[in-house]
Amino acid sequence: MQFTEGIAPDTTGASTKDRGNAPVFVLGCGRSGTTLLYHMILSAGGFAVYRAESNVINLLEPRFGNLSIRRNREKLMDAWINSKLFRVSGLNADEIRNKVLQECRNGGDFLRIIMGGMARHQGVRRWADCTPEHLLYMSRIKETIPDALIIHIIRDGRDVALSTDKLGYIKRAPWDNWAVSSTTIWITTAFSRSGSDLSASRTRHSRQTTGTSTRSAAGSKAFLHRAWRCLKVWSVRH
C-alpha cells in the first residue's frame, strides 16, 4: 500500500500553534481506510477517544433543522441523549444538555460542544471525527468550524466496490445487479468532487493506491462488468 499526499495551500493565516489545537476530520468514501487512520491518530495521544461516528453534519443537523431555534435544540438533545452516541461519550447528560441549549446555534457548534466536552473530560486538548459522509458536507464544516483540519482519503474505486460488495454493505434486489456499482460510482465521484471544491482550504488529500500485482484480474473484471451494467441500465431508463 502506498500513500501519495498533496497539501492545499493554507490561506487562513493560522499559526502553527492554532493548527496544533485544531480539530481533525478524517473523511472519505466508506471502505477507504478512514476508521483505520482515525484510530491511528487517536493512538498517537492528545485526542479525545470517541468510538463512534458522530453523524452530526450529515444527519442530525438536517433532521432537526435550524438549531438557532431553542425548540429544535431541545428535540436534538432528547434524541441524542437517548442514543448510543451519547452513551459512549462519557458525558454528564444534564451538563451537556444545558451547554448545548445555551450555546449551540448550528451543527458545527453542537459537534464542537460535545467533542470539546469529551476532550476536557479525558484531559486532552483535541478531538477528531471520522464520519465518512461528512465529506459531502465539507463546505458546511468549514463554515461552522473554520479552524477544522481535513484529511481526505481517496481509495481506488475498484477496491472500494469490491470491499463493499464482499461485506454486503449494500443490499440489492435480485434484479438489480447494477446497484453496488452505481452506488459506489456515485459516492466516489461525489466525494472526490467535494474534496476538490475546497482546494484552497486546509485539506490534506491521502490517495491510497495498490499495485497491480495485488489486485486480481478477476476483481477488476468484476468491477468493470458491474459498471458496464450500470451504464446500460442508466441509458435505457433515461
Image (cartoon, grey):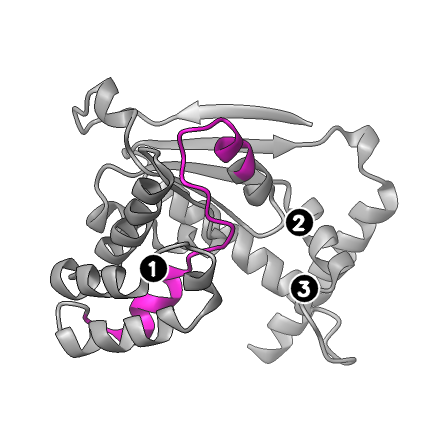
Q: Which residues are magenta?
A: 39-66
Amino acid type, residue under disc 1 in the picture: Ile
Q: Point out the image quarter for the N terminus.
A: top right
Q: Nearer the viewer, residue 108 or 140?
A: 108
Instruction: State the residue at coordinates (24%, 60%).
Output: 95
Question: Is residue 92 depicted above or below 214 in this figure?
Answer: below
Instruction: State the residue at coordinates (42%, 50%).
Output: 135
Amino acid type, residue under disc 3 in the picture: Tyr
Measured Cα–Cα span from mark 3 to mark 1: 22 Å
Question: Is residue 2 depicted above or below 32 in this figure?
Answer: above
Residue contact at pointers 3 and 2, CB within 8 angstroms: no
Amino acid type, residue under disc 2 in the picture: Val
Q: Position of residue 172 (x, y in %)?
A: 71, 75
Q: Earlier in the sequence, mark 3 or mark 2?
A: 2
Displayed quadrant of residue 173: bottom right
Disc 2 target residue: 160
As drawn, the label of residue 57 is: 1
Instruction: State the residue at coordinates (70%, 47%).
Output: 158
Specify few, some or many for label 2: CA neighbours under 10 Å numbering under 14, 14-19, or 20 or more: many
Element type at marker 1?
helix
